[in-house]
Image (cartoon, coloured by chain):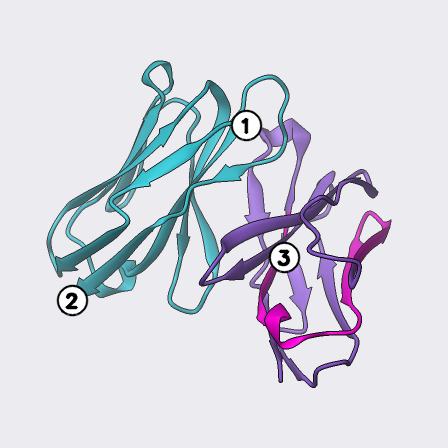
Amino acid sequence: DAGVIQSPRHEVTEMGQEVTLRCKPISGHDYLFWYRQTMMRGLELLIYFNNNVPIDDSGMPEDRFSAKMPNASFSTLKIQPSEPRDSAVYFCASSHTGAGNTIYFGEGSWLTVV
Amino acid sequence: GIQVEQSPPDLILQEGANSTLRCNFSDSVNNLQWFHQNPWGQLINLFYIPSGTKQNGRLSATTVATERYSLLYISSSQTTDSGVYFCAVHASGGSYIPTFGRGTSLIVHP
């Protein structure tokens, strides 16, 4: 399997611009997670989906963040408008209920907002 | 919710040394994973080990679920072992959401 695929790998954008991060989970996985990692806060769970339905978005920092999963093979995390404090690595991960919920991470999207 | 504590927080080794990383958790679990985040930021699965012992090359892991801890052993460490090691658990009772420890940062010097 190709693993969890994220794009872009790196993005530098100006404050106020919209940022869209993309994720393709492993085929057949029924859970999808979005995490953010910073030096200060470590690895934070932002939102997760089960069978394409958002289950818990309590980790989303504010209304500027939104996530969608229109089908089983695609999800987006959008930040609008972006701010410098959003600079972080954003990871997408997926897991399958029938496989002990072993979680697999993508390579991350490195976001810098200047 | 379940608490996950990893120790030590930081570890510096000379190449060739052995080390043991520990993960304690506060409640029963039905899944436990160890990850290595390499210096390039990739999070790599090392072990899925809710109980028992597994080995993969120079790495091995043991989880004693009844005593609520897991150990990751690194033998004959290499510079490529540098990075952060995370433990993640799923609490028993149907939780599908992993709870991560804060990690152990390992530096292996040549």
Q: Disc 1 marks which amino acid?
A: Gly
* A68 sits left or right of B90 in the view: right
List x then y, in percent, for residue A12: 64, 83
Query: Dividing the picture into quarters, in which one does residue A39 lie?
Result: bottom left
Residue B31's disc is: none
Q: Which residue is mark 1?
A: B1
The colour assigned to chain A within the rendered structure: purple
The residues colored magenta run A66-93
Which residue corresponds to the image point at 23% horizontal and 61% vertical from the top-left? B107
Q: Earlier in the sequence, mark 2 or mark 1?
A: 1
Which residue corresponds to the image point at 72% horizontal and 47% vertical from the top-left? A27
- Establish if B94 lies above or below A108: above
List x then y, in percent, for residue A32: 70, 46
How many discs mark residues in the rendered view?
A: 3
Which chain does the numbered disc 3 sit on? A
Foreground pick, A80 / B22: A80
Res B53 seen here = no
Is label 2 in a helix, a strand or a loop? strand
Q: Which residue is mark 2?
A: B109
